[in-house]
Amino acid sequence: MATNINAANFNTAKLNNNNTIQKREVFGWAMYDFANSSYTTVVITYIYSAFFISTIIPKESSLQDTYWSIAIVASTLFSVILSPILGAMADFNGRKKKYLIWLTSVSVVFTASLFFVKPGQVWLGISLLVFSNTAWMLSENFIASFLPDITTPQNIGKISGLGWGIGYLGGLLSLILMLVIITANKYENPELYIYQNQVAMFAAALFYLLAAIPSFIFLKERKLTATGYSGQSVATLVKASAIKASNMMALINQYPTLFRFFIPFTMYSAGISVIVKFFGIYASEELSITGTFLILAGAILQLSSMLGAVVFGFMQDKLGAKFTLQLSLLWWLIGLLGIYYLETISLFFAIEIKLMFIVIAFISGSALGATQSASRAIVGLITKKEDASLSYGLWGVFGKFAIVLGMVFGPISDAVGRHSALLVIMFYFLVGLFLLKLVPFETLPNQPKN
Protein backbone atom coordinates (compact mmCIF):
# COMPACT_ATOMS: atom_id res chain seq x y z
CA MET A 1 0.00 0.00 0.00
CA ALA A 2 1.39 3.39 -0.93
CA THR A 3 2.21 5.72 1.90
CA ASN A 4 1.52 9.43 1.79
CA ILE A 5 4.84 10.91 2.82
CA ASN A 6 3.69 14.01 4.64
CA ALA A 7 5.34 15.55 7.66
CA ALA A 8 1.91 16.11 9.18
CA ASN A 9 1.51 12.36 9.65
CA PHE A 10 4.28 12.59 12.19
CA ASN A 11 2.07 14.57 14.54
CA THR A 12 -0.29 11.62 14.92
CA ALA A 13 2.37 9.59 16.68
CA LYS A 14 1.32 8.74 20.22
CA LEU A 15 3.17 7.92 23.36
CA ASN A 16 3.18 4.41 24.75
CA ASN A 17 0.76 3.72 27.58
CA ASN A 18 3.59 3.30 30.06
CA ASN A 19 4.71 6.90 30.67
CA THR A 20 5.98 6.31 34.19
CA ILE A 21 9.41 7.75 34.79
CA GLN A 22 11.48 5.56 37.06
CA LYS A 23 14.69 6.41 38.87
CA ARG A 24 16.50 3.59 37.15
CA GLU A 25 15.65 5.15 33.78
CA VAL A 26 17.11 8.48 34.89
CA PHE A 27 20.15 6.51 36.04
CA GLY A 28 20.37 4.75 32.67
CA TRP A 29 20.14 8.07 30.84
CA ALA A 30 22.82 9.68 32.99
CA MET A 31 25.08 6.66 32.56
CA TYR A 32 25.35 7.40 28.85
CA ASP A 33 26.92 10.75 29.69
CA PHE A 34 29.24 8.78 31.98
CA ALA A 35 30.09 6.41 29.11
CA ASN A 36 30.61 8.77 26.19
CA SER A 37 32.62 11.25 28.24
CA SER A 38 35.44 8.73 28.12
CA TYR A 39 35.64 9.31 24.36
CA THR A 40 35.75 13.09 24.34
CA THR A 41 37.98 13.20 27.43
CA VAL A 42 40.58 10.67 26.33
CA VAL A 43 40.48 10.95 22.53
CA ILE A 44 39.55 14.56 21.82
CA THR A 45 40.54 16.72 24.77
CA TYR A 46 43.54 15.32 26.62
CA ILE A 47 45.32 12.15 25.50
CA TYR A 48 45.02 11.37 21.79
CA SER A 49 44.93 15.01 20.66
CA ALA A 50 48.29 15.69 22.32
CA PHE A 51 49.67 12.32 21.11
CA PHE A 52 48.47 13.00 17.55
CA ILE A 53 50.13 16.42 17.44
CA SER A 54 53.41 15.40 19.05
CA THR A 55 53.88 11.88 17.66
CA ILE A 56 51.65 11.02 14.68
CA ILE A 57 52.24 14.28 12.80
CA PRO A 58 55.87 14.66 11.65
CA LYS A 59 57.88 17.19 13.65
CA GLU A 60 58.76 19.21 10.56
CA SER A 61 55.10 19.85 9.66
CA SER A 62 53.91 23.45 9.91
CA LEU A 63 50.24 22.38 9.92
CA GLN A 64 49.99 20.63 13.27
CA ASP A 65 46.90 22.35 14.63
CA THR A 66 45.45 22.53 11.12
CA TYR A 67 45.58 18.73 10.71
CA TRP A 68 43.70 18.31 13.99
CA SER A 69 41.14 20.91 12.88
CA ILE A 70 40.63 18.99 9.61
CA ALA A 71 39.69 15.84 11.53
CA ILE A 72 37.27 17.75 13.73
CA VAL A 73 35.69 19.78 10.90
CA ALA A 74 35.24 16.76 8.60
CA SER A 75 33.49 14.72 11.29
CA THR A 76 31.42 17.74 12.21
CA LEU A 77 30.21 18.31 8.65
CA PHE A 78 29.20 14.66 8.32
CA SER A 79 27.21 14.91 11.52
CA VAL A 80 25.60 18.17 10.35
CA ILE A 81 24.31 16.37 7.25
CA LEU A 82 23.13 13.28 9.11
CA SER A 83 21.74 14.81 12.33
CA PRO A 84 18.38 16.14 11.10
CA ILE A 85 17.78 13.10 8.86
CA LEU A 86 18.48 10.54 11.58
CA GLY A 87 16.60 12.62 14.14
CA ALA A 88 13.52 12.80 11.96
CA MET A 89 13.74 9.08 11.17
CA ALA A 90 13.75 8.34 14.89
CA ASP A 91 10.69 10.54 15.36
CA PHE A 92 8.88 8.67 12.59
CA ASN A 93 9.69 5.10 13.60
CA GLY A 94 10.02 5.60 17.36
CA ARG A 95 13.36 3.80 17.64
CA LYS A 96 15.66 6.31 19.28
CA LYS A 97 17.36 3.67 21.40
CA LYS A 98 18.12 1.50 18.37
CA TYR A 99 19.92 4.40 16.68
CA LEU A 100 21.75 5.16 19.92
CA ILE A 101 23.06 1.59 20.15
CA TRP A 102 24.22 1.53 16.53
CA LEU A 103 25.99 4.87 16.73
CA THR A 104 27.70 3.87 19.96
CA SER A 105 28.93 0.67 18.33
CA VAL A 106 30.37 2.54 15.34
CA SER A 107 32.18 5.02 17.56
CA VAL A 108 33.58 2.24 19.75
CA VAL A 109 34.91 0.21 16.79
CA PHE A 110 36.70 3.14 15.13
CA THR A 111 38.06 4.40 18.44
CA ALA A 112 39.58 0.98 19.12
CA SER A 113 41.02 1.03 15.57
CA LEU A 114 43.21 4.01 16.51
CA PHE A 115 45.41 1.33 18.10
CA PHE A 116 46.78 0.60 14.60
CA VAL A 117 47.81 4.18 13.71
CA LYS A 118 51.59 4.63 13.70
CA PRO A 119 53.75 7.79 13.62
CA GLY A 120 53.57 9.42 10.20
CA GLN A 121 50.19 7.85 9.30
CA VAL A 122 48.44 11.19 9.57
CA TRP A 123 45.61 10.55 7.13
CA LEU A 124 44.81 7.11 8.53
CA GLY A 125 44.52 8.71 11.94
CA ILE A 126 42.34 11.50 10.58
CA SER A 127 40.06 9.00 8.80
CA LEU A 128 39.50 6.89 11.90
CA LEU A 129 38.93 10.02 13.98
CA VAL A 130 36.33 11.24 11.49
CA PHE A 131 34.29 8.03 11.71
CA SER A 132 34.54 7.69 15.49
CA ASN A 133 33.82 11.35 16.19
CA THR A 134 30.92 11.56 13.71
CA ALA A 135 29.17 8.64 15.40
CA TRP A 136 29.92 10.08 18.82
CA MET A 137 28.43 13.47 17.95
CA LEU A 138 25.30 11.89 16.49
CA SER A 139 24.85 9.77 19.61
CA GLU A 140 24.91 13.00 21.65
CA ASN A 141 21.77 14.15 19.85
CA PHE A 142 19.92 10.91 20.52
CA ILE A 143 20.72 10.65 24.21
CA ALA A 144 19.73 14.31 24.62
CA SER A 145 16.37 13.63 22.94
CA PHE A 146 15.44 11.29 25.82
CA LEU A 147 15.66 14.18 28.29
CA PRO A 148 12.08 15.53 27.85
CA ASP A 149 10.78 11.95 28.29
CA ILE A 150 12.29 11.51 31.74
CA THR A 151 11.88 15.02 33.19
CA THR A 152 9.36 17.76 33.95
CA PRO A 153 9.80 21.51 33.34
CA GLN A 154 10.44 21.83 37.08
CA ASN A 155 13.39 19.40 37.25
CA ILE A 156 14.84 19.34 33.73
CA GLY A 157 17.73 21.64 34.67
CA LYS A 158 18.63 19.54 37.70
CA ILE A 159 18.53 16.23 35.83
CA SER A 160 20.42 17.64 32.85
CA GLY A 161 23.06 18.94 35.25
CA LEU A 162 23.16 15.57 36.98
CA GLY A 163 23.83 13.91 33.63
CA TRP A 164 26.67 16.29 32.81
CA GLY A 165 28.08 15.86 36.33
CA ILE A 166 28.06 12.07 36.08
CA GLY A 167 29.54 12.45 32.61
CA TYR A 168 32.52 14.30 33.99
CA LEU A 169 32.89 11.59 36.62
CA GLY A 170 33.13 9.11 33.74
CA GLY A 171 35.76 11.29 32.12
CA LEU A 172 37.66 11.47 35.42
CA LEU A 173 37.66 7.68 35.84
CA SER A 174 38.76 7.17 32.25
CA LEU A 175 41.70 9.49 32.88
CA ILE A 176 42.61 7.50 35.98
CA LEU A 177 42.59 4.43 33.73
CA MET A 178 44.99 6.27 31.43
CA LEU A 179 47.31 6.86 34.39
CA VAL A 180 47.53 3.10 34.81
CA ILE A 181 48.14 2.43 31.11
CA ILE A 182 50.43 5.30 30.05
CA THR A 183 53.49 5.22 32.28
CA ALA A 184 56.40 5.60 29.85
CA ASN A 185 58.23 8.85 29.18
CA LYS A 186 58.11 9.72 25.48
CA TYR A 187 61.72 10.98 25.55
CA GLU A 188 63.27 8.14 27.57
CA ASN A 189 61.35 5.23 26.02
CA PRO A 190 59.53 6.46 22.90
CA GLU A 191 58.58 3.02 21.56
CA LEU A 192 56.88 2.00 24.81
CA TYR A 193 55.22 5.41 25.01
CA ILE A 194 53.73 4.97 21.54
CA TYR A 195 52.52 1.45 22.30
CA GLN A 196 50.91 2.51 25.57
CA ASN A 197 49.05 5.35 23.86
CA GLN A 198 47.80 2.90 21.24
CA VAL A 199 46.59 0.51 23.94
CA ALA A 200 44.92 3.46 25.65
CA MET A 201 42.64 3.92 22.63
CA PHE A 202 41.47 0.33 22.84
CA ALA A 203 40.88 0.72 26.58
CA ALA A 204 38.91 3.95 26.06
CA ALA A 205 36.69 2.22 23.51
CA LEU A 206 36.03 -0.68 25.88
CA PHE A 207 35.25 1.72 28.72
CA TYR A 208 32.76 3.54 26.48
CA LEU A 209 31.00 0.33 25.46
CA LEU A 210 30.74 -1.27 28.89
CA ALA A 211 29.61 1.92 30.63
CA ALA A 212 26.84 2.46 28.04
CA ILE A 213 25.18 -0.91 28.74
CA PRO A 214 22.95 0.43 31.58
CA SER A 215 21.58 3.03 29.14
CA PHE A 216 20.70 0.33 26.62
CA ILE A 217 18.96 -1.69 29.33
CA PHE A 218 17.04 0.94 31.32
CA LEU A 219 16.02 3.59 28.76
CA LYS A 220 12.52 3.07 27.35
CA GLU A 221 11.13 3.70 23.90
CA ARG A 222 7.98 5.73 24.59
CA LYS A 223 6.82 6.45 21.07
CA LEU A 224 4.85 4.29 18.72
CA THR A 225 5.61 4.47 15.02
CA ALA A 226 4.02 7.52 13.41
CA THR A 227 0.72 6.76 11.67
CA GLY A 228 1.23 5.30 8.22
CA TYR A 229 4.89 4.40 8.77
CA SER A 230 4.67 1.06 10.51
CA GLY A 231 6.63 -1.57 8.59
CA GLN A 232 7.74 0.85 5.89
CA SER A 233 11.02 0.38 4.07
CA VAL A 234 14.16 2.27 4.99
CA ALA A 235 13.92 4.23 1.72
CA THR A 236 10.41 5.41 2.61
CA LEU A 237 11.52 6.47 6.07
CA VAL A 238 14.53 8.31 4.67
CA LYS A 239 12.37 10.19 2.17
CA ALA A 240 9.79 11.08 4.82
CA SER A 241 12.53 12.12 7.22
CA ALA A 242 14.18 14.33 4.60
CA ILE A 243 10.88 16.14 4.08
CA LYS A 244 10.45 16.59 7.81
CA ALA A 245 14.01 17.78 8.30
CA SER A 246 13.90 20.15 5.34
CA ASN A 247 10.77 21.84 6.62
CA MET A 248 12.82 24.05 8.92
CA MET A 249 10.91 27.23 8.23
CA ALA A 250 7.76 25.67 9.66
CA LEU A 251 9.70 24.66 12.74
CA ILE A 252 11.10 28.18 13.06
CA ASN A 253 7.53 29.55 13.07
CA GLN A 254 6.51 26.91 15.58
CA TYR A 255 9.40 27.50 17.97
CA PRO A 256 10.65 31.08 17.44
CA THR A 257 12.35 31.29 20.84
CA LEU A 258 14.34 28.13 20.16
CA PHE A 259 15.88 29.46 16.97
CA ARG A 260 16.59 32.84 18.54
CA PHE A 261 18.45 30.93 21.24
CA PHE A 262 20.43 28.89 18.70
CA ILE A 263 22.20 32.06 17.44
CA PRO A 264 24.06 32.94 20.68
CA PHE A 265 24.35 29.22 21.42
CA THR A 266 26.35 28.79 18.20
CA MET A 267 28.71 31.63 19.11
CA TYR A 268 29.60 30.64 22.65
CA SER A 269 29.66 26.96 21.71
CA ALA A 270 32.35 27.81 19.16
CA GLY A 271 34.48 29.02 22.05
CA ILE A 272 33.77 25.89 24.07
CA SER A 273 34.64 23.68 21.09
CA VAL A 274 38.11 25.23 20.86
CA ILE A 275 38.75 24.65 24.56
CA VAL A 276 37.55 21.04 24.42
CA LYS A 277 39.44 20.16 21.22
CA PHE A 278 42.69 22.01 21.98
CA PHE A 279 43.12 21.92 25.77
CA GLY A 280 45.53 18.99 25.74
CA ILE A 281 47.39 20.40 22.75
CA TYR A 282 47.79 23.84 24.35
CA ALA A 283 48.90 22.40 27.68
CA SER A 284 51.44 20.02 26.16
CA GLU A 285 52.84 22.19 23.37
CA GLU A 286 52.76 25.65 24.99
CA LEU A 287 53.38 24.82 28.65
CA SER A 288 55.20 21.46 28.31
CA ILE A 289 52.58 19.75 30.48
CA THR A 290 52.89 16.14 29.37
CA GLY A 291 52.55 12.56 30.54
CA THR A 292 51.25 11.96 34.05
CA PHE A 293 51.09 15.69 34.80
CA LEU A 294 48.80 16.24 31.79
CA ILE A 295 46.51 13.42 32.87
CA LEU A 296 46.36 14.83 36.40
CA ALA A 297 45.56 18.28 34.99
CA GLY A 298 42.75 16.74 32.97
CA ALA A 299 41.46 14.88 36.02
CA ILE A 300 41.35 18.10 38.02
CA LEU A 301 39.47 19.87 35.24
CA GLN A 302 36.98 16.96 35.02
CA LEU A 303 36.32 17.25 38.75
CA SER A 304 35.76 20.99 38.44
CA SER A 305 33.42 20.53 35.47
CA MET A 306 31.46 17.84 37.29
CA LEU A 307 30.88 20.09 40.31
CA GLY A 308 29.95 23.01 38.07
CA ALA A 309 27.42 21.00 36.08
CA VAL A 310 25.57 19.83 39.21
CA VAL A 311 25.66 23.16 41.06
CA PHE A 312 24.64 25.24 38.05
CA GLY A 313 21.92 22.69 37.22
CA PHE A 314 20.25 23.31 40.58
CA MET A 315 20.83 27.03 40.08
CA GLN A 316 19.01 26.97 36.75
CA ASP A 317 15.87 25.45 38.27
CA LYS A 318 15.95 28.10 41.01
CA LEU A 319 17.14 31.25 39.23
CA GLY A 320 16.35 30.61 35.59
CA ALA A 321 18.18 29.66 32.40
CA LYS A 322 19.18 33.17 31.33
CA PHE A 323 20.95 34.06 34.58
CA THR A 324 22.70 30.68 34.71
CA LEU A 325 24.01 30.93 31.16
CA GLN A 326 25.16 34.54 31.51
CA LEU A 327 27.00 33.75 34.73
CA SER A 328 28.73 30.74 33.16
CA LEU A 329 29.86 32.80 30.14
CA LEU A 330 31.26 35.54 32.38
CA TRP A 331 33.06 32.81 34.32
CA TRP A 332 34.58 31.58 31.04
CA LEU A 333 35.81 35.05 30.11
CA ILE A 334 37.50 35.55 33.47
CA GLY A 335 39.23 32.19 33.15
CA LEU A 336 40.43 32.91 29.61
CA LEU A 337 41.84 36.26 30.68
CA GLY A 338 43.68 34.38 33.40
CA ILE A 339 45.23 32.02 30.84
CA TYR A 340 46.08 34.90 28.50
CA TYR A 341 47.94 36.72 31.29
CA LEU A 342 49.17 33.48 32.85
CA GLU A 343 52.82 34.48 33.03
CA THR A 344 52.06 37.79 34.74
CA ILE A 345 49.67 36.19 37.24
CA SER A 346 52.07 33.37 38.08
CA LEU A 347 54.83 35.93 38.75
CA PHE A 348 52.52 38.03 40.91
CA PHE A 349 51.55 35.08 43.11
CA ALA A 350 55.04 33.51 42.92
CA ILE A 351 53.58 30.22 41.71
CA GLU A 352 55.10 28.02 39.01
CA ILE A 353 53.39 28.68 35.70
CA LYS A 354 52.22 25.07 35.27
CA LEU A 355 50.58 25.02 38.70
CA MET A 356 48.99 28.42 38.08
CA PHE A 357 47.56 27.10 34.82
CA ILE A 358 45.94 24.18 36.64
CA VAL A 359 44.52 26.49 39.34
CA ILE A 360 42.93 28.76 36.73
CA ALA A 361 41.70 25.75 34.72
CA PHE A 362 40.06 24.33 37.84
CA ILE A 363 38.27 27.58 38.63
CA SER A 364 37.11 28.38 35.09
CA GLY A 365 36.46 24.74 34.18
CA SER A 366 33.41 24.64 36.43
CA ALA A 367 31.64 26.66 33.72
CA LEU A 368 32.15 23.90 31.14
CA GLY A 369 29.47 21.54 32.39
CA ALA A 370 27.25 24.44 33.43
CA THR A 371 27.08 26.03 29.97
CA GLN A 372 26.52 22.75 28.15
CA SER A 373 23.97 21.42 30.64
CA ALA A 374 21.92 24.64 30.69
CA SER A 375 21.88 24.79 26.89
CA ARG A 376 20.63 21.21 26.59
CA ALA A 377 17.91 21.79 29.19
CA ILE A 378 16.63 24.92 27.43
CA VAL A 379 15.90 22.95 24.25
CA GLY A 380 13.82 20.52 26.29
CA LEU A 381 11.92 23.37 27.96
CA ILE A 382 10.92 24.97 24.67
CA THR A 383 9.90 22.04 22.48
CA LYS A 384 7.13 19.47 22.59
CA LYS A 385 8.09 15.92 23.50
CA GLU A 386 6.94 14.57 20.13
CA ASP A 387 9.41 16.90 18.42
CA ALA A 388 12.27 15.98 20.75
CA SER A 389 14.40 13.93 18.37
CA LEU A 390 14.22 16.51 15.57
CA SER A 391 14.67 19.45 17.94
CA TYR A 392 17.72 17.91 19.55
CA GLY A 393 18.93 16.92 16.12
CA LEU A 394 18.78 20.59 15.14
CA TRP A 395 20.42 21.50 18.45
CA GLY A 396 23.17 19.15 17.36
CA VAL A 397 23.36 20.77 13.92
CA PHE A 398 23.88 24.23 15.41
CA GLY A 399 26.37 22.73 17.83
CA LYS A 400 28.24 21.31 14.85
CA PHE A 401 28.17 24.67 13.06
CA ALA A 402 29.76 26.04 16.23
CA ILE A 403 32.55 23.46 16.02
CA VAL A 404 33.27 24.35 12.39
CA LEU A 405 33.34 28.02 13.36
CA GLY A 406 35.58 27.27 16.31
CA MET A 407 38.06 25.23 14.29
CA VAL A 408 39.33 28.31 12.48
CA PHE A 409 41.42 28.46 15.66
CA GLY A 410 43.67 25.75 14.14
CA PRO A 411 45.03 27.66 11.12
CA ILE A 412 44.98 30.96 13.05
CA SER A 413 47.04 29.29 15.78
CA ASP A 414 49.54 27.96 13.23
CA ALA A 415 49.79 31.46 11.74
CA VAL A 416 50.04 33.71 14.82
CA GLY A 417 50.73 31.32 17.70
CA ARG A 418 48.44 29.62 20.20
CA HIS A 419 48.72 32.33 22.84
CA SER A 420 47.57 35.14 20.52
CA ALA A 421 44.82 32.88 19.15
CA LEU A 422 43.23 32.81 22.63
CA LEU A 423 41.68 36.17 21.67
CA VAL A 424 39.53 34.30 19.13
CA ILE A 425 37.97 32.23 21.93
CA MET A 426 37.26 35.34 24.02
CA PHE A 427 35.59 36.95 21.01
CA TYR A 428 33.19 34.01 20.67
CA PHE A 429 32.16 34.20 24.31
CA LEU A 430 31.69 37.98 24.24
CA VAL A 431 29.46 37.86 21.16
CA GLY A 432 27.48 34.94 22.59
CA LEU A 433 26.96 36.79 25.87
CA PHE A 434 25.70 39.88 24.06
CA LEU A 435 23.31 37.96 21.78
CA LEU A 436 21.97 35.98 24.74
CA LYS A 437 20.49 39.21 26.09
CA LEU A 438 18.20 39.35 23.04
CA VAL A 439 16.55 35.96 23.71
CA PRO A 440 13.13 36.23 25.47
CA PHE A 441 13.77 33.58 28.13
CA GLU A 442 10.86 34.91 30.17
CA THR A 443 8.49 33.42 27.57
CA LEU A 444 9.84 29.86 27.93
CA PRO A 445 6.74 27.67 27.88
CA ASN A 446 6.98 23.97 27.21
CA GLN A 447 4.64 24.44 24.26
CA PRO A 448 5.26 26.27 20.97
CA LYS A 449 3.52 29.53 20.14
CA ASN A 450 0.38 29.32 18.10
Image: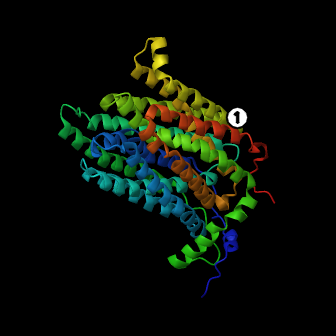
**Residue found 52% across the figure and 63% down from its top:** 82
Which quadrant of the rendered structure holds the N terminus? Answer: bottom right
- Residue 231 visible? The answer is no
Quarter assignment of residue 371? top right
Q: Between residues 161 and 258, which one lies in front from this camera angle? A: 258
Looking at the rendered image, the quarter that the C terminus falls into is bottom right
With 131 as the anchor, is 365 left or right in this view? Answer: right
Q: Residue furthest right?
A: 450
The type of residue carrying mark 1 is: Phe
Picture quarter containing residue 221? Answer: bottom right
Callout count: 1
- Residue drawn 58% across the image and 50% down it: 22
Please tell me which residue is depicted at 75% across the width and 43% down the height of the picture. Answer: 438
Q: Is residue 312 left or right of residue 77?
A: right
Residue 80 to residue 54: above or below: below
Q: As displayed, is residue 79 above or below residue 438?
A: below
Q: Position of residue 100 (x, y in %)?
A: 48, 59
Q: Is residue 281 left or right of residue 95?
A: left
Tell me if 361 is positioned left or right of 381 in this view: left
Residue 291, x across and y down, in percent? 30, 32
The quadrant holding residue 179 is top left
In the rendered image, residue 444, in percent from the top left (x then y), is placed at 75, 47
Disc 1 crowd rating (10 Å Cα; few below 14, some 14-19, many 20+) is few
Residue 208 image position (x, y, % from top left): 39, 49
Way the structure is coloured: rainbow
Q: Is residue 197 visible?
A: yes
Q: Is residue 182 above or below residue 215?
A: above
Farthest residue in the front direction? 415
| Residue identified by numbered label 1 | 323
Residue at 49% x, 46% y is 408
- Secondary-structure class at tag 1: helix
Viewer-closest of 14 and 345: 345
